[in-house]
Image: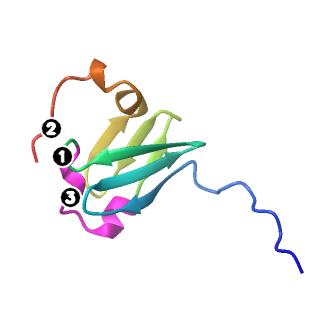
Amino acid sequence: MKSATRGVGTSPAEVTNVDIHGIWVLVGEREYFLPHEDFPWFKRARIEDVLNLELLHGRHLYWPTLDVDLSIDSLEHPERYPLVAEG
């Protein structure tokens, strides 16, 4: 007996992994790594808050319970966004 083929995910953006180094976020077919040293808001956050992720307008990640929002462009082109967050 074979399992059914996996379907398309129901969430356009999701956190796929959390560890001591950072978090991984899957948006569509692309995965991004957000290291804690660059994104300190997630380091001491509760897991349920890190997992509570929304994709707005197809290009904007928003964690409502953490009040953190990031443009996907800032993840794809960090050189265009030289400011560093302080945790």
Boundaries of the magenta span: 39-51
Give the spatial CA distance, label 3 vs label 2: 13 Å
Residue 47, magenta (yes or no)? yes
Q: What residue type is labelled 1?
A: Glu
Q: Residue at image x 33%, y 37%? A: 70
Q: Quadrant of the N terminus?
A: bottom right
Task: Verify CB contact (< 8 Å) between mark 3 and mark 2.
Answer: no
Mark 2 and mark 1: Cα distance apart in space = 9 Å
Residue occupying image coordinates x 18% and y 46%? 37
Q: Does the magenta stretch include residue 35?
A: no
**Which residue position holds label 1?**
37
Kindly identify the amino acid type of the residue bearing the numbered disc 2. Ala
Tag in front: 2 or 1: 1
Which residue is under mark 3? 43
Q: What element carries label 3?
A: loop
Disc 1 element: loop
Badge 2 is on which residue? 85
Residue 48 is situated, as x and y percent measured from the top left of the image, at 35, 69
Are the residues tagged 2 and 1 within 8 Å (C-beta)? no
Pointer 1 local density, CA inside 10 Å: few below 14, some 14–19, many at least 20: some
**56 left or right, relative to 70:** right
Residue 2 location, quadrant: bottom right
Q: Residue 13, position in %: x, y?
A: 51, 49
Residue at image position (29%, 58%) is 65
Q: Nearer the viewer, residue 70 or 65?
A: 70
Q: Which amino acid does label 3 sit on?
A: Lys
